[in-house]
Image (tube, helix red, strand yellow):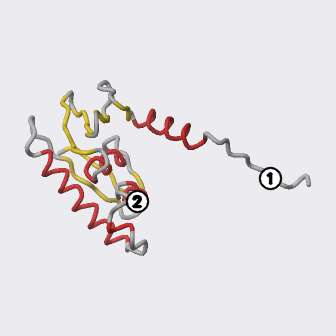
Amino acid sequence: MPNDLYITIPDDFEKKYLEYKNKTLGVGENNTSSNLHTKGSNGYIKINDNVYDLGPAKNIPYLLISTLYPLGIEKRIEIVYKDSTPEVSKFNKDSNISLASKKEILRNRIKEVQRILKNQKPKIKLTIKFKKITDTAYIEQK
């Protein structure tokens, strides 16, 4: 019929999407020129020409920073929460967590990032900010 719409998704769509997403965010395996990268199993972020080790790339600190990267760019709280929660997390079991609870969980996650960063030099502090009107979150350097 002339009014029917058919969408065909290529078999390699997910692979191409992830390549595009990683390219857009500056994520790259062993790419030290990138601001956000992994080397081996650890994740790193480069801020002000200093590289900071965020620990294992599959853990919450790196997942949170990689989700909210680049600094200052707003992302929906729901997406930040979902993308920074590891698959094996206890938080994946309950999908009915309120927005207020998700914000509190994200605040605790950024504290975990701060604990990691406080032992590295030069000192740096990242904080998470929320915008109530748009239900978005972003990180900034203090």
Disc tally is: 2
Instruction: Give coordinates of residue 103: x percent, y percent.
Output: 31, 65
Under circle 2, the secondary element is: helix
Q: Is residue 47 above or below residue 135?
A: above
Q: Which mark is residue 82?
A: 2
| Left or right, residue 86 beside residue 49 | right
Identify the residue shown where x is 22% and y is 55%. Answer: 110
Residue at x-position 31% and y-position 72%: 101
Q: Earlier in the sequence, mark 2 or mark 1?
A: 1
In the rendered image, the quadrant that contains the N terminus is bottom right
**Amino acid identity at mark 1:** Leu
Q: Position of residue 21 (x, y in %)?
A: 47, 39
Q: Which residue is mark 1?
A: 5
Which residue is nearer to you in this view: 79 or 137? 79
Q: Which label number is shown at residue 13?
A: none
- Quadrant placement of the C terminus: top left
State which quadrant residue 122 falls in. top left
Q: Residues within 10 Å of mark 2 (few under 14, many from 20)?
A: some
Q: Residue 81's image quarter?
A: bottom left
Q: Residue at x 34, y 48 (%)?
A: 68
User: In the image, what residue type sits under mark 2?
Assistant: Lys
Q: Secondary structure at mark 1?
A: loop
* Mark 2–mark 1 distance (CA, rounded to whole Å): 31 Å
| Residue positioned 8% across, 43% down in the render | 119
